[in-house]
Image: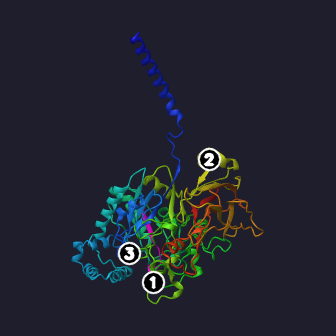
Amino acid sequence: MKTTITRLSVAITLSSLSWMSQAASEYSPNVGQALPNRVLFGDTHLHTAYSTDAGMLGNRLGPAAAYRFAMGEEVTSSTGVKAKLARPLDFLVVADHAENLGFPVQLAQGNAKLLGNAFGQKMIEFVKAKQFAEAFAYWRSQRMAGTDPTAGLGLEKDAWDQLTTLADQYNQPGRFTALIGFEWTSAPGGRNLHRNVIFRDDKSKAGSITPFSTYDSPDPEQLWQWMADYEAKSGGKVLAIPHNGNLSNGLMFDDVTLTTQKPLDKAYAERRARWEPVVEVTQMKGTGETHPLLSPNDEFANFELLDKAALAGPVPTTPEMYPREYARAALERGLAYEAKLGANPFKFGMIGSTDSHTSLATSEENNFFGKVTPVEPSPRPERFNELITGRMPNAPAVIQQAMWKASASGLAAVWARENTREAIWDALARKEVYATTGTRLEVRVFAGTDFTAADLTRADWVANGYAKGVPMGGDLQVNAQSQAPSLLIKASRSADGANLDRIQVIKGWLDSQGQTQEKVYDVAWSGARQPGKDGKLPPVGNTVDVKNASYSNSIGAPELETYWQDPAFKAGEKAFYYVRVLEIPTPRWTVYDAKVFGTTLPDEAPTAIQDRAYTSPVWVNSL
């Protein structure tokens, strides 16, 4: 009997296994699923002591500390203040300046290669005499003259080897991603043409080169050629992210090439769109979405602006420069270029990042460690009054903008399937990304011509969105028989963040006369508000308590969603749509500072801020 039972049991088990092998591959809906199903938040623009304009100004924290901080660890800042994020970031790019990369660290270590170099010897003398300001000014004079004072010493290659080694060391696929990158810091005449260069690759490929710097060339076209050469030689992948067009005196999105001053042609447009798929639209040095003079009917256009001058140039910014500085106007002009050239040079998605030079990726209003080490949290007057622009001697007051105007911003949000270098880089390349001004609100958008309101409530609304439409960053094809484009939009606040005020759709298009147009639509909002006779939605309210640096989520909504169809689309028109989501007002970082340190706010300083998100556009192409 015992033997019989054993044989029977084996038979049942084998039969069950046979049945299971047939059913398993057909049951789980996630097998083979590749749709992006999570949003990851990170910073693609952080500087450490390896950047000369950070290390020479007191930053003592290297990349290791930057990674540990981004991963959620408590660190001590260069000024001795303990710092920690409320929640870890998902990814980080240490994007130290390519120009004299690693020099402050090498100088502090007494690198032997500097001893035989006249510039190195002079800098060592400055440091021994504790004349740090003089040392920085001397280096900066060489830098602005375009002269590499350490040429031929191989210092940048040494530093790059260290940076790429650390990036690989801290990269933990599935938990935390350390992408390899650097900043190319072109600033002709002090005008900002900076780009962050980000690799998809590990050290085996990215470590094989030395970063391209403006000592090699200040022309972005030469940077693109260097990137093309890198890909051809290594088999790797790389992209560039421009930032701070608002500090470029109209150069960032110019109508002519930088060196030859020739009008943009199709080849230029294709190359720029290829190598620069996204733009950093918000960071500490201001928000570059739009400007009140460009968008006079946009009541939220006057947001965290630094619009008086270039970063380090003496020339004031004038209104005629704005269309070539701000993202929305560039996106609109891109439609006109596409109609004329057959290619769009300004077809970019949008992200945010910090541009912090403290090694601390802080974008929260109540945890803002400032632009550079001298303005880290303290009651010192420099915290508010140090100049961002107009720092040169005898600079006119009109171009001087103080640190209290700096933004506690921003973050890059990417839609990905997994937290890896490859998935994050691919999201940037396909533009399925969005910018936030520092908070972690979640936004998802699909555009199509076959959506209905019922698609918004489907359990599989994401899979259906990809099947019937395109996500942010995509191209929507329409024809004469198509319905007007429609959008499915869902937004939610972060778990520990502020409620939402409204969702807006920004449309840009090319009219029948070839003129660029724009319109802002309020498409979903909290409460029982209704638009007035002027079409404007009443403000959501303001619960900010300035004295106590607090606010209440008694207004607004934790989530908003909507189906919206363009009521004015005309067949054949070129257009784009992007979504802007506004939070309710919360205390600005300057208000938190005033409470903590007892400092007095500047009279002009706002006491509240409406943080927001900007999604990458969807472009409509008529067949």
Q: Position of residue 225 (x, y in %)?
A: 41, 66
What residue range appears in magenta?
188-198
Task: Give how far across and how far down residue 494 sits, in percent.
Answer: 55, 57
Which residue is situated farthest in the right direction here? 533
Circle nearer the N terminus (1, 3): 3
The C terminus lies in quadrant: bottom right
Q: Is residue 323 left or right of 593 when viewed as pictured?
A: right
Q: Is residue 586 or residue 119 the one in the foreground?
A: 586
Residue type pointed to by label 3:
Asp
Name the secondary structure under disc 1: loop
Question: Between disc 2 and disc 3, whose residue precedes?
Answer: 3
Q: In this view of the protein, which residue sits in the foreground, 545 or 242?
A: 545
Say which residue label 1 marks.
Answer: 391
| Residues at discs 1 and 3 in contact (Cβ within 8 Å) | no
Three-letter amino acid code of the residue under disc 2: Trp
At horizontal 61% and vertical 49% (from top left) the residue drawn is: 465
Q: CA distance from mark 1 to mark 2?
A: 52 Å
- Which callout, 1 or 2, points at the residue further toward the start of the chain? 1
Circle on res. 53? 3
Looking at the rendered structure, the kind of residue marked 1 is Arg
Residue 229 on the magenta segment: no
SS at mark 3 in the image: helix
* Mark 2 secondary-structure assignment: helix
Tag 2 residue: 461
Q: Nearer the viewer, mark 1 or mark 2?
A: 1
Instruction: Please provide percent x and percent y for residue 5.
Output: 42, 13
Which quadrant, please, contains the N terminus? top left
**Residue 320 at x, y = what percent?**
59, 80
